[in-house]
Amino acid sequence: MSNKNVETYFEDGTWKNRITGNSRASNTAPTKAEAQAKGRQMAIDRSTEHVIKNMDGQIGNRNSYGNDPHPPKG
């Protein structure tokens, strides 16, 4: 499995998911919630991070589903 992150983003009026570094989307969804759910499952399956972007392209949230290099303390 690759350790590249999964990215959920908005482009051309559609929410999409892709593996970081790929130019093409892996899948699309009509809503952000549906795209996030698909992206989350992709990240879990790949044991990597899920980067969720806002409509403007800025990172809105990040969730790690793999070996976190900076785990929470305590």
Image (tube, rainbow, N blue to C red):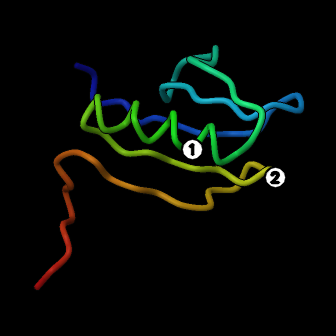
Asked which quadrant contains residue 44, the reply is top left
Q: What residue is rendered at 55% in x and 25% in y?
A: 18
Asked which quadrant contains residue 42, the reply is top left
Amino acid type indicated by mark 2: Asp
Q: What residue is rendered at 52% in x and 41% in y?
A: 37
Asked which quadrant contains residue 4, the reply is top left
Nearest to viewer (mark 2 / mark 1): 1
Residue 3 tag number: none
Report the number of numbered marks. 2
Amino acid type indicated by mark 1: Gln
Q: What residue is rendered at 18% in x and 67% in y?
A: 71
Q: How far apart are marks 2 and 1 (CA)?
A: 16 Å
Element assignment for label 1? helix
Classify 10 Å Cα crowding around label 1: few (below 14), some (14-19), many (20 and above).
Answer: many
User: Whole-percent x and y of residue 43?
Assistant: 37, 36
Of the image marks 2 and 1, the number of the one nearer the N terminus: 1
Residue placed under numbered mark 1 in the picture = 36
In this orientation, which residue lies closer to the viewer: 30 or 19? 30
In this orientation, which residue lies closer to the viewer: 49 or 36? 36
Residue placed under numbered mark 2 in the picture = 56
Element assignment for label 2? loop
